[in-house]
Amino acid sequence: MGKCSSSYWTKSAQICNAIISPTHSAGVLAAGSLFVTCFGIGWGVLQTCGVDGSIAVFSSLVGIATALTFILIVLSRLFRWQLIVFAIRADIAWLSNLQKKRDQVIIGVGPGGAIIAGIISKEIGASTGHEPTLIVFDRVFQRNGPAIGVSLGTVKPADLSIDLSNIEILLATSEIHSGNTMKVVFEELKAAGASEDSIRTFSFVFDDKSTFKCDRYVVCSSTRDVLPWLDDPKRRGK
């Protein structure tokens, strides 16, 4: 397994991914804690104001605490876009690969990878004054019962011709689970002339059960709730 980038925003992304996940124990605990906190504050205010407890008052407090908990969770989900940008920005030194003298190409894998690669490219441009070339490989999932196959789809830009034998490649994606997609892309790049030691890999979310070794990641988890876009329906089995 690769190395997790180390920064305040990395830890924040990991916490956010756990808290807003409805299936994660931390998410259930966080929602319960928010509810108890809101209810306790409301009850304390009422007691200070001399309001006597009753079934109606209790029911009202439960409703208000539930609504506030829901609103706070929604607001935390809206913050995910900024969290992704901040986490990438905090790791820009590794992503920009400044110690290398050769040109760098960023390849985004899949729709989510296109977003992550675009943010990385913009942040490198803001940091160094030069945005690297950006390429996007789409990928197609084929579901056959419980099994999921993957193949490469269209490449953008389609007419791009680059000699891969003398450049640094940053292969970026939003999430790695089984690792099958990245394996396909990795082998395609090597077949096109790229050397294995010139390819570095980055994923925002990385499942440590993956059979593909990712060089760098932000969140190590089997869930991807920190990402603000929906997963591919075929991968979700829908």
Image: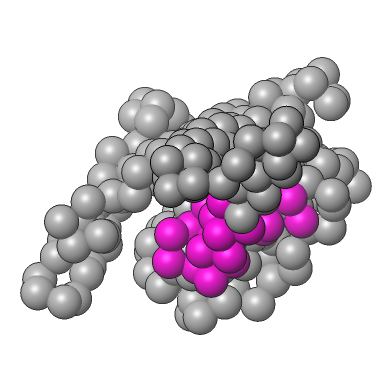
Total numbered labels: 0
Kindly report the secondary structure that dominates the magenta region of the rendered protein. Answer: helix
Q: Is residue 32 left or right of residue 89?
A: left
Q: Is residue 146 left or right of residue 219?
A: left
Q: Is residue 57 left or right of residue 38?
A: left
When the figure is inspected, residue 162 is found, relative to residue 197, above or below; the finding is above
Q: List x then y, in percent, for residue 119.
A: 62, 31
Q: List x then y, in percent, for residue 214.
A: 61, 67
In this orientation, which residue lies closer to the viewer: 215 or 135?
Answer: 215
Which quadrant of the figure contains the C terminus? bottom left
Please tell me which residue is depicted at 76% across the width and 56% down the height of the picture. 11
Q: Is residue 152 left or right of residue 116?
A: left
Please tell me which residue is depicted at 42% across the width and 41% down the height of the picture. 56
Is residue 125 located in the magenta-colored stretch of the structure?
no
Please tell me which residue is depicted at 48% across the width and 52% down the height of the picture. 225
Q: Residue furthest right?
A: 99
**Is any part of residue 70 visible from this angle?**
no
Q: List x then y, in percent, for residue 213.
A: 59, 73
Q: Which residues lie in the magenta part?
A: 11-35
In this orientation, which residue lies closer to the viewer: 27 or 52?
Answer: 52
**Is any part of residue 157 visible from this angle?**
yes
In this orientation, which residue lies closer to the viewer: 190 or 34?
Answer: 34
